[in-house]
């Protein structure tokens, strides 16, 4: 028996059914948009009728008669008024539309998932915030978490973004170890990969935990609005500093909170130490400092790594030398020490004679030393002195002689830093991922935030003297001769470079000849008094004493 073909309506029915459903859905959406006012008014009339029925049911029986009489009198008055029924209808429709409008749902408390997370945090804190002798413990297993967590907020993923905790007064919040345990616990339980800030109110027994937004990485090298003697090290949180500078970012011009380092005779932190991991942006920071210092001073660069990261500065106006070898580095640093002494003697002689200091002693001199540990190893292998020994005079007397020293080193070679570098560099910066104890060894104290394991280049922490620890994002200042540099960043750096000199080479001996001879021994100029150290160096690595 031959099979009969299926009807055409069955063979092509699936496509037609899908098309019909789409047409019906579109028609329903259009009808809903058109009939939305009518639906709103109908919903409002239903709510008004329900309210009137509820009020009538709540009215006592002895008052229902007078109420009906009053309503009838009002209806009669409205009916007899000119345009009364029309006004009554318009008023009723307006009231129905207002009552039937869709109101957004206001969240009045945490949902079930957020309550479960808060309970988990509460139970995790019980062993740290409770003792057995407490008659009314604030933290107890199975207790009420609402009394301990006074404020809280969550993100879209249900992770807490802010948490205000009330803890008992007997908790040892003055001990750094006890506070570190609480911070580590909250960091692990609230979600890793984010940077948290912990503000301890020891007087009120309150702990405020908040999630910090990532610092912007869209600010590149540019001419910042500063005065001579001010250097923009990077940018931080808006509530951490009181000064902002206008910058040009990727999304336009804005005012960014800047970490400004002040140098000169009145500076309390005349020298800077930068420590970081490989690829963390220490060289980029030194390059940014050099570009900001060149319009007002002279720069001497000594690169221990020998990678040519400062080749763009070679032969530029204001750049005295860019040395990568051991012999050139020793000669340059020896000249810098003699230049510092010459400036001190000339300024002291001018003060004794009642004259202002000479102009050449007031022009700032910047000594940028990158990776001195490598040069120290080469010098030790060759039987020559460590280049850091030549920095003692510029470090001790650089503030009075307008000489600023910036040293950059990596964590694996931080123990090679000399005692003079550790003692006189009171402005400190840590870049790249680092453990809290590593940050505390450099800055002298731990930051109030939790470092993340993955950070972009130029991200870290800064501390100027005994001030607070600030988050820092260094402006992008890459090597313009590097092929991996973007065109925008390359052009930004090239625009800041000074013009090249007619002679691309400058011998250190030529500068030494121009220096005047020191004062005769018969009438020696009084030696500059060494400035007292304001405090112990925060870098706590044991090193042998000098001398």
Image: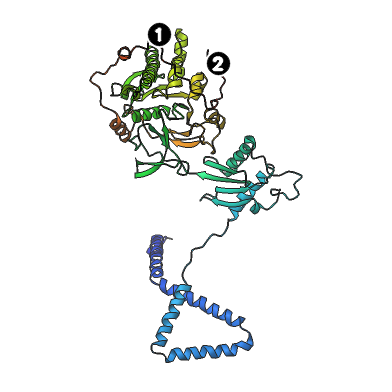
In the image: residue 394, left or right of residue 168: left
Residue 383: x %, y % from top left: 46, 7
Considering depth in this image, is 427 or 504 the residue closer to the camera?
A: 427
Which residue is outermost to the top?
383
Does the image show residue 159?
no
Indicate the position of residue 207 as horizontal and vertical percent values: 60, 45
Query: Marks 1 and 2, how far apart in space?
Result: 34 Å
Characterize the local packing of mark 1: few (<14), some (14-19) or many (20 or more) Cα atoms within 10 angstroms: few
Q: Is residue 258 visible?
A: yes
When the figure is inspected, residue 301 is found, relative to residue 15, above or below; the finding is above
480 on left or right of 473: left
Q: Residues within 10 Å of mark 2 (few under 14, many from 20)?
A: few
Q: Is residue 219 above or below residue 310?
A: below
Q: Secondary structure at mark 1?
A: loop
In the rendered structure, the answer to whether residue 196 lies left or right of residue 241 reads right
What residue is disc 1 on? 522
Q: Earlier in the sequence, mark 1 or mark 2?
A: 1
Which circle, 1 or 2, is nearer the viewer?
A: 1
Residue 197's tag is none
Q: Residue at x 75, y 47 (%)?
A: 134
Label 2 secondary element: loop
Residue 95, above or below 305: below
Image quarter in which the N terminus is found: bottom left
**Residue 545 — which label?**
2
Observer-nearest of 280 and 430 = 430
Above/below status of 434 relative to 182: above
């Amino acid at each position: 028996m031959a099979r009969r073909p299926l009807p055409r309506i069955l063979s092509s029915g699936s496509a037609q059914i899908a098309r019909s459903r789409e047409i019906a859905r579109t028609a329903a959406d259009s009808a809903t948009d058109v009939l939305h006012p009518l639906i709103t008014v109908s919903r409002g009339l239903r709510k008004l009728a329900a309210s009137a029925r509820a009020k009538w049911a709540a009215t006592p029986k002895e008052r229902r008669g007078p109420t009906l009489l009053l309503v009838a009198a009002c209806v009669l008055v409205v009916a007899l008024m000119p345009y009364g029924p029309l006004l009554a209808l318009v008023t009723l429709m307006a009231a129905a539309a207002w009552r039937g409008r869709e109101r957004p749902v206001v969240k009045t408390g945490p949902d079930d998932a957020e309550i479960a997370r808060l309970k988990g945090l509460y139970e995790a804190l019980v062993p740290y915030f409770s003792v057995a002798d407490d008659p009314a413990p604030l933290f107890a297993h199975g207790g009420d978490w609402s009394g301990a967590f006074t404020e809280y907020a969550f993100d879209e993923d249900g992770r807490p973004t802010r948490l205000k905790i009330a803890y008992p007064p007997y908790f040892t919040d003055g001990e750094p170890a006890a506070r570190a345990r609480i911070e580590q616990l909250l960091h692990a339980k609230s979600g890793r990969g984010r940077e948290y800030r912990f503000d301890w109110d020891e007087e009120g027994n309150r702990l405020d935990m908040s999630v910090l937004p990532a610092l912007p990485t869209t600010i590149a090298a540019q001419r910042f609005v500063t005065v001579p003697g001010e250097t923009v090290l990077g940018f931080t949180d808006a509530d951490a500093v009181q000064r902002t500078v206008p910058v040009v970012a990727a999304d336009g011009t804005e005012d960014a909170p800047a970490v400004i380092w002040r140098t000169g005779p009145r500076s309390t932190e005349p020298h800077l130490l930068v420590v970081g991991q490989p690829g963390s942006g220490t060289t980029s920071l030194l390059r940014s400092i050099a570009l900001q210092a060149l319009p007002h001073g002279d720069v001497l660069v000594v690169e221990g790594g020998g990678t040519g990261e400062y080749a763009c500065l070679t032969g530029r106006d204001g750049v005295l030398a860019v040395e990568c070898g051991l012999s050139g580095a020793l000669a340059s640093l020896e000249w810098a020490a003699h230049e510092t002494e010459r400036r001190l003697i000339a300024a002291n002689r001018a003060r004794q004679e009642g004259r202002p200091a000479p102009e050449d002693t007031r022009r700032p001199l910047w000594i940028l030393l990158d990776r001195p540990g490598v040069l120290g190893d080469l010098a030790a292998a060759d039987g020559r002195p460590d280049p850091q020994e030549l920095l003692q005079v510029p470090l001790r007397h650089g503030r009075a002689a307008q000489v600023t020293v910036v040293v950059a080193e990596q964590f694996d070679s931080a123990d090679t830093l000399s005692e003079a570098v550790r003692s006189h560099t009171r402005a400190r910066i840590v870049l790249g991922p680092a453990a809290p104890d590593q940050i505390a060894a450099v800055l002298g104290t731990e930051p109030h935030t939790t470092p993340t394991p993955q950070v972009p280049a130029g991200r870290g922490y800064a501390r100027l003297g005994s001030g607070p620890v600030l988050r820092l994002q260094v402006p992008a200042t890459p090597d313009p001769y590097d092929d991996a540099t973007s065109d925008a960043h390359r052009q930004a750096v090239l625009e800041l470079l000074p013009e090249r000199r007619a002679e691309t080479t400058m011998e250190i001996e030529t500068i030494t000849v121009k220096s005047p001879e020191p004062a005769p021994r018969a009438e020696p100029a009084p030696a500059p008094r060494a400035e007292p150290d304001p405090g112990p160096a925060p870098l706590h690595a044991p090193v042998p004493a000098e001398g």
